[in-house]
Image (cartoon, coloured by chain):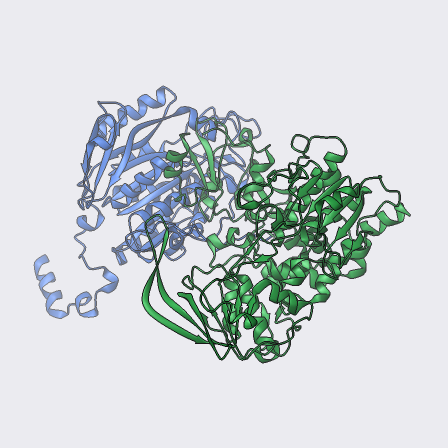
Amino acid sequence: MSFYKPNFRHPAAPTNELGLTAKAYEGGISTLCAGCGHDSISAAIIQAVWGLNIEPHRVAKMSGIGCSSKSPNYFLSKAHGFNSVHGRMPSVTTGANVANRDLMYIGVSGDGDTASIGMGQFAHVIRRNLNMMYVVENNGCYGLTKGQDSATADQGSKSKKGRINPFEAIDLVALALDLGATFVARSFSGDKEQLVPLMKAAMAHKGFAIIDVVSPCVTFNNHAGSTKSYDHTREHVQAGSVVDFVPMAQEITLDQIKGSTQNVSLHNGDSVRLSKLSDNYDPTDRHNAIHTLLEHKAQDKLMTGLIYLEPDSENFHETLNVPDQPLNELKEDVLCPGVSALKSINDGLR
Amino acid sequence: MKATDISNPEYFHKVVDCQYACPAHTPVPEYIRLIGQRRYSDAYMVNWESNVFPGVLGRTCDRPCEPACRRGRVDEEPVAICRLKRVAADNKDDDNVNARMPVIPTEKNGKKIALIGAGPASLTVARDLMPLGYEVDLYDENPKGGGFMRSQIPSFRLPEAVLDQEVDYVLDMGVTRHFNTRVESMKGILDKGYDAVFVGTGAPKAKDLRIPGRDEADANIHLGINWLENVAFEHIDKIGEKVVIVGGGNTAMDCCRTAKRIGGDEVSVTVRSTYEAMKASPWEKDDTLAEGIPILANHSPKEFIVENGKLVAMTFNVVESSYDENGKRTIKETGEVATVECTDAIMAIGQDNAFPWIERDVGIEFGDWDMPIVDKVSFQSTNQKVFFGGDAAFGPENIITAVAHGHQAAISIDLFLNGSSVTEARPAPGTNLVSTKMGIHQWAYDSDVIDDDRQASAHLPVEQALSSRKIESEIGFDLDAAFIEAERCLNCDVQTVFVESKCIECDGCTDICPTNCITFINNEEEDTLRDKLNAPSLNKDTDLYVSTDLPTGRVMVKDEDVCLHCGLCAERCPTSAWDMQKFLYTVTKAGNEPAPILVEQTGGAKKQEQAA
């Protein structure tokens, strides 16, 4: 009758290195429409954070407004969270990140929250290379207000009522590449095998990591003629690089994966292992990434996977030379070093 | 793997673990739901149709259903199915139940059947054949019907009134009773011209223990089942002060608890095995210990000690059990000898079949261990007219098995007397599969999975329980506890039914499933598939539900093992590719009549009016 999730779990549910089963990473039961891609993305986040052995309370879930931005309720209920103003999640996350750089920041946004009202904030958080994972749950429509075309709806895509979208779409991946993002990926909510390792890599990346996830709206944008439906996405998806996230502790054996592989080491010693569909695709080459992306688009293909990665980028904290200890832990004597320190600063400016 | 054929009723039948494990295949979740709805008479009738003795079984069943219960695989303990059955029996409305008893045709079909032995198997045959118009003659050496339910199960576990009522439901159908009549000759019975004979004489011969001192102490050595029978029929009403029971099965538990009630002050049970390996049901052992009766494990009988012509003690070799890697047990003597003082000793070390009354030239062939050769499906012997069931067929089992045999033997007798093949023409089970969807988040069953622990069944204080052998020692569930216990049932008969053509592979079901039962994966051989599922496949005995190929080339694989039947997969499915459908499986009875499981409260009365 009522809508709740039983407390029983699989009796042999695996535990991570912290001894926790995935249950510790769950959230409330979703009130999104049944079959919503966003719920699959929430499930992928649960798997990724659990798999990275991050304690749930070391995570902060940040969001704005929209169906996507409701979804942090549905994972990691023991994490911190801030459901901010529409399109303003990046600035709130910047503030939180400045105050406590030790938390893992997971921003969840939608196509409206990012590409329309939040466009300005989105652009600037990329420029600043803020250390966070920014997930766009991209369904090409405004699901919360009955499915109007959003700014990421493809030109020529048909709405549920039959109207063809006349406007060019904003490609968030192309935009992020152009603005200098240091980790850019695209995926599909219906493909956790790709999405979960991408998320792990994005969270391990020290800097701004965006994953644009096509996440079909079952209620308003999952019909024939839509370019963001389950069927259309499955037909047009082309994985640019199949990703496997390899934690530092784990030895990499290349023969585990077929085809040619490439390892890209991350900042902290973890690495991303790429198995490439095409031998000449190098995801550390930004020009090539932009070029390949456009090529795919021209062929009506949706390029997914890890599209670009700059492993040794300088992130926001490094650029600003912020101390290693989170600001919210600094005591008064450090934050207000006194008259003599002020005098020496002033002297330095004379 | 090949796609699962859900049109085969055996597939979903197996998912209902309790019902599948029950020899009579009683639709357990069906009646537990009725108890939850406080429809005790309806719950009783669902049971009665299937197992004939709900009140008896609700107290004494060996409960093969409970170890099978799915709840036991996700929670600490299974649902208390047996005691819930008792709740239905204890709280039924007798008038309602009486009105729903089958209508017996006044005009008979001209066929006459003899039933030898008035135990559960024979009574079940009578119950199934009487409504079809057969004339039934029932023979038993005792003054009342019930067989070993009466002679071997003490009244403090099974009150006489409960047994009488359920035996009478059958006898009152018009069975001709020949009680106090010991059948001494099968030939004599066959000569009477019966169209068919059913043998339900049980396994009446108690095993004896031939060790030194046996003959000298004979006056104070009793054979368990015979002794219990003598107590039940009040030929014995007391025993000496110090009693030792030899044996570790349920009969031993009944003997010691009876002895404690009729004069045994110091009663102990001795068993050759370890405590854990004893054959008695765990709850029977618990009840025994609770009454202050010690169980001495690893005691192998050595000798009866007789002084001045009287039994004074028994000696035992203390032994050790060890198991090899194949689980084979070796018992070794430690050299230590233990002595237990006693005035009486009761041997409860097993029982055998015995058919001295069946002449070997009446066409009934006997095989190994001097047992009749009986077909495992039809229960027919090599004399086509003679059928066997219960313990008489294949050796000692239990009441519910005897009932299952009775139903099947009745089908065979009916087929045989109508000129049909008893093996080829057997009726298919009755099945029904109906959606329970009523609306958004609304199902026609209580899909919530509650966290409550198994409820404890209340017992009388020990002194009060021991004051008489006729006071029932267990009080059972009160109605509040029964409701909670009923709600613990996971409704495994409400099946998750998957329709491939509707699935859009959105992963909604996979993501929500609390026990990670569902995986979308490329198809492979079963073993490989089991290794690759989202959650470990712990129980290879439960099936995988595999779909045909989906548009992405993958298949849906559901491991049935720990599915909570909570319905969340169906609630999160945008296209209703998943649906929760109530599956009802009933064993069809003689005369091809499917069990009228869902009779309304007034159904029986109406049926009677129509017949009148």
Relative to the observer, which residue lies in front, B599 or B161? B161
Residue B454 at least partly seen = yes
State which quadrant residue B473 falls in: bottom right
| Vertical relation: A53 (above or below) A182 | below
Viewer can see residue A188? no
For residue B253, above or below residue B527: below
**In the figure, residue A280 lies in which quadrant?**
top left
Give the x, y percent position of residue B141. Answer: 72, 58
Residue B561 percent across, percent down from the top left:
47, 45
Q: Which chain is green?
A: B
Specify the farthest residue to the top.
A299
**Could you say which is closer to the camera, residue B155 or residue A185?**
B155
Q: Is residue B335 left or right of residue A70?
A: left
The quadrant in which residue B460 appears is: bottom right
As rendered, which of B227 and B31 lies closer to the eye? B227
Does residue A38 sit above or below A6 in this rendering? above
Q: Measuring 11% from the left and 62% from the top, which residue is drawn there?
A: A346
**Numbered circles on residues, count:** 0
Where A182 sits versus B155, above or below? above
State left or right for residue B590 relative to residue B29.
Answer: right
Chain A, which colour?
blue
**Residue drawn at the location 11% of the way across and 61% of the way down:** A345
Q: Quick one: quadrant of the N terminus of chain B?
A: top left
Residue B513: give x, y in percent of width and height: 47, 46
Task: Provide residue A152's location: percent of width, then percent of height.
Answer: 42, 33
